[in-house]
Image (spheres, rainbow, N blue to C red):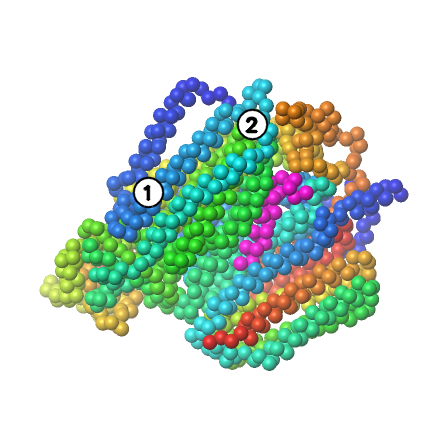
Amino acid sequence: MASAAVPRRGMFARPTAKTGVWGWVTTVDHKKIGIMYGVTAFVFFILGGLEALAIRTQLAAPNQETLSADVYNQFFTMHGLTMIFLVVMPMGTALMNYFIPLMIGARDVAFPRLNALSYWVFLFGGLFLYSSFFLGGAPDGGWFGYAPLSTELPGPGMTFYAVGLQILGVASIAGAVNFIVTIINMRAPGMTFMRLPVFIWMTLVTSFLLLFALPVIAVALFQLMFDRVYEANFFNPAAGGDPLLWQHLFWLFGHPEVYIMILPAMGIVSDILPTFARKPIFGYAAIVFAGIAIGFMGWGVWAHHMFTSGLGPVANSAFALSTMFIAVPTGIKIFNWLGTLWGGDIRFTTPLLFAVGFVAMFVIGGLSGVTHSIVPHDAQQHDTYYVVAHFHYVLFGGAIFGIFAGLYYWWPKVFGRLLSEGLGKLHFWLMIIGFNLAFGPMHIYGLQGMPRRIYTYPDGMGWNFWNLVSTIGAFAIALSVLVFLGNVIVSRRRGEIAGADPWDGRTLEWSIPSPPPEYNFAEIPIVKRRDDWWYTKYTETPEGVPTPVHTGGVDVDDEDEDPGRHIHLPDPSYFPIVAAAGLPVTGYGVIYENPVLIAAGLVVTLLGLFGWVLEPSAEEGH
Amino acid sequence: MRIPNRVRNRTPLALAVAAAAFLGSACAEQAPQDVLAPEGWYAEKADDLWNLVFPIAVVIFFIVQALLIYALVRFRHRPGREAQQFHGNTKLEVVLTAIPALILAGIAVPTVRTVFELTNEPTENVLNVTVKAHRFWWEYQYPDLGLVTANELHIPTGQPVRVRLEGIPTDRVDSTAQVIHAFWVPRLAGKQDVVPGRVNYITLEADEPGIYAGQCTEFCGLGHAEMRLRVIAHDPEAFDEWARDLAEPASAPTDSLAREGERLFNEGQFPNGPPCVACHAVDATYEAGNEPQQAGPNLADFANRDTFAAAIFENTEENLAPWLRDPNAVKEGARMPALGLSEDQIRALIAYLQTLE
Amino acid sequence: MAAHGAAAAVHDEQHHSSTGVDNTKMAMWAFLGSECLFFGSLISTYLLYRNRVLDGPRPHEIYDIPYTSVSSFVLLMSSLTMVLALAAIQRRDMRGCRIWLLATAMLGMIFIGGQIYEFTTFVEEGLKLSTSTFGSSFFVMTGFHGAHVTVGIFMLLALFGMSMFGRLDDADGPRKVELIGLYWHFVDIVWIVIFTVVYLVPTN
């Protein structure tokens, strides 16, 4: 494991720590970075959940005064920002980070230090955003920040929004570049594109979506920032500024963004269902191409968020059609998941339950989404709780359930121990029941005319009963999350030892020990077919029945004590966290209109980048 | 996973009861903003599309969930079970792709047709109304009648009312940019945004006289939840009478308290602000080309309004007094300042307001 | 010795790329793809707003086309010197590479100097960021372009410095120069688009 003589030159000597706090701070190992992403995202999940509970408490009955309008507006804004940018996206990134190299047969991602930078920028960006609560008020203009409200709202809140999201965007673009190059360029020999697990395909599409969508919102956020801080006129109607420009730019990002959130979860489900049905994914090519189609078509639907803005009947009709037709590739995936279960030998483990829950809930969300495309009726649904129901079904019932499926599925690989099945099933049932109690009724009171983003509502509207049910459901969800946390704690010591392949899996990550050694693979595998690991364990009889191969299933407990001793891995590095640290400093400089802070942050980042480029290379990146 | 018999037997009943409750509550009587109970032509056209699409969605829902549950039950692991190792079925996949596409095409045609139908400008017997959205109240101008009012929009039944949603660029209180609002009266029509610097249109047509509730449905800041409105539809003769009444100036108050209130309204010296007339007019008439520019709602015929402060309070003395004392304390984000009125002044002003009819 | 040989084999294996394209080059192309959307959004905003001038000068009242043509030519020439720098290092002419890198950086600095002069002139003539939607969109768009050129200049000077310390002498040197070259050419192409769309195309 010790690297060959690495030249040490004064301050640029690379750190060597692999354990302890310093080991985590300077790590460039994708597995450690994945764990950090996951833990951090989970903490934000708790924070976003607490915001949701506060919202639901306030709305449990009419005319409540638990939260003032001011506090409520901050809470619903931060709930949205947190769940989207600080939970679903980074949780997906955590799993992508850990498992892309393992599933394609690589030792790390293409740019390990850039990977570390992405994590630290994410952490600092999230902390920066949350610091706003203590520094004059959190963003309160909604996660979608429509101008001119977002340019006009007093206080620093919406400037934290503009700057904070920019910082987070840097992390995501860097991650997207990293994953694209990794997947395209670092596959093991024989791992052709059509042999890649569906999860990897979905990650590739997601990364391209990030690459092209984030710059658009970056422009919008810069324009918002210039309007707020430097008196520009981008969204100033009195100077001819057009509020719809914000909406177009935002939703050009915003719609691909929802596919960014759902595709990784779809990929996870596409790898879990075959494993627990013990048969291949039904229609691999169709699922892959449907994912690619969704990626492309997702660029053509953005104005369905603007049906009531006055775009005119031609534009509205065009976007209605494109929105309807994006249901087609989505439907392909759902039928193919059903086809995967069909004829299988289904084992009801927790990961399978969450994957099935995903399919069931996503169908509901998808159907309500299609009803949104009926433009004249969307004029009734838009900005009501009916929409809130729709996106929670696809983002919670979809993305979050998919993520939990992935967590339960891959937990044994990461930590070497299985999570408790009993607690896992309790978590699942409590969560799916609580989820439907919370969000199902929103379809009803949305259609009964309850708008979104209102901190209170009067009596006599017909909304009281179902709002109370929603609140109860929300607390049930919270309880289920506590069950998950309990499972995590209990399983640390008492979880069943997993071994390399606890689920009798199909993909390469199950061919190495749990947890994997730092170098992942002692020998880079030669891939002969899709689901190659499965076929090293099983061959098919003429009747199509899998039978174990006698010499299959590589014994991963090597006789060689340290099979990785010849493998050179990149050394850790200080400079990603240094470079990342400059960004929030510049951010605070913008908030406080302090040019010294702005410059100081840029200098810190520049120094970090110089050190990065100049530090002794350790077979890193090239 | 063995499902106990008693659960299996009672589950269909439980599901049926739940479904009935779910759907039944959707027809709640006390739901003034119920989208599923349209009472105007435009809302009815949208509802027609819903009545086409929703049942299709429900059927698809049941089919897919049934297939899912069936697969899970039928193909669950039992000792000796072997999974069938098929990779796909191209013909099935093509058919299952084509069917949704055809269904969607079937939905698309009436949708697009209705989109164009609803955007067509009515030509016969149209009443024009201009809506301007403020933080956090609604201004209505009737250009054909030269009248302006606020928050409660009166319209005649049986006649299309062409609503011009005019997004004013700046806020009249502090000249900052105005924000986007959306005008929505669910039982009469779908919503449209009021975008600063732009003009949008909807058409309202009420079948029956009555009161139709609505509210702002584009997040606009602190007062968003309390920016509500009412549309009050009258028979055509009753509407004409209302309009005539509005145009007529209120008779001068005879009661001494009300007279004092009138004096305060026009010339009062208050600790925290100018007299009421600086922001509120009591004359509803205006001339074309000289549209009203007051920062606050027009108060002509105030005494005849059911509600005030953007339809959030009943128009009673119990509600007016706290409002006049400190508007922000009862409506967070209200732009009207707490003028520092004494209790006597409040009583006088209320007496005056009650003479405005 | 055997261990070192094995290590070298592993080393090579790690640098194997599935497509034959180097990782950093692929990364740069991906990043530049992202930048296309970035500048595309800025330019689209400008196109929307350039004729909405309620206050202050209009575009063609204030543009000095001959002046901007000269600075555009300067930037164009810098792409030529960049190509020459890469050609030099590819034939191991380190001194030549350094000269052409420096020339590229200096031409870039002249361009930036010209931009700064243009901006200050516009401000004096009544066009500021806060003047109109035209002013806002013009300065933000060209300002971000200028910032990108500035970052490029930093990277060119860094390459120059690395070369002085012999850090471009190995087989990997040309790759690093090519990488910065890709970025520099992209920034130049963006300017060509901006110059055409913003300055040359007449507005009403």
Residue C183 colored in magenta in the image: no
Expressed as whole percent of the image width and height from the top left, the position of residue C82 reads 72, 68
Query: Mark 1 is on which residue type?
Result: Asn
User: Which disc, if any, is residue A146?
Assistant: none
Residue contact between numbered discs 1 and 2, judged by CB atoms under 8 Å: no
Horizontal placement of C109 versus A594: left or right? right
Which residue is at 64% across, 50% downward?
A180
User: Which disc, if any, is residue B51?
Assistant: 1
Query: Mark 2 is on which residue type?
Result: Gly
Residue span colored magenta = A192-216
What is the chain letter for disc 2? Answer: A
Report which quarter residue B127 is drawn in.
bottom left
Name the element at disc 2.
Answer: loop
Report which quarter residue A567 is drawn in.
top right
Horizontal placement of A603 versus C171: left or right? left
User: Which disc, if any, is residue A344?
Assistant: 2
Residue at the limit of the structure toward the front, as seen here: B91
What is the chain letter for disc 1? Answer: B
Compute the Cα span from label 1 to label 2: 38 Å
Which residue is at 42% across, 46% downward?
B105
Label 1 Cα crowd, 10 Å radius (few <14 / some 14-19 / many 20+): few
The answer to whether residue A550 is seen in the rendering is: yes
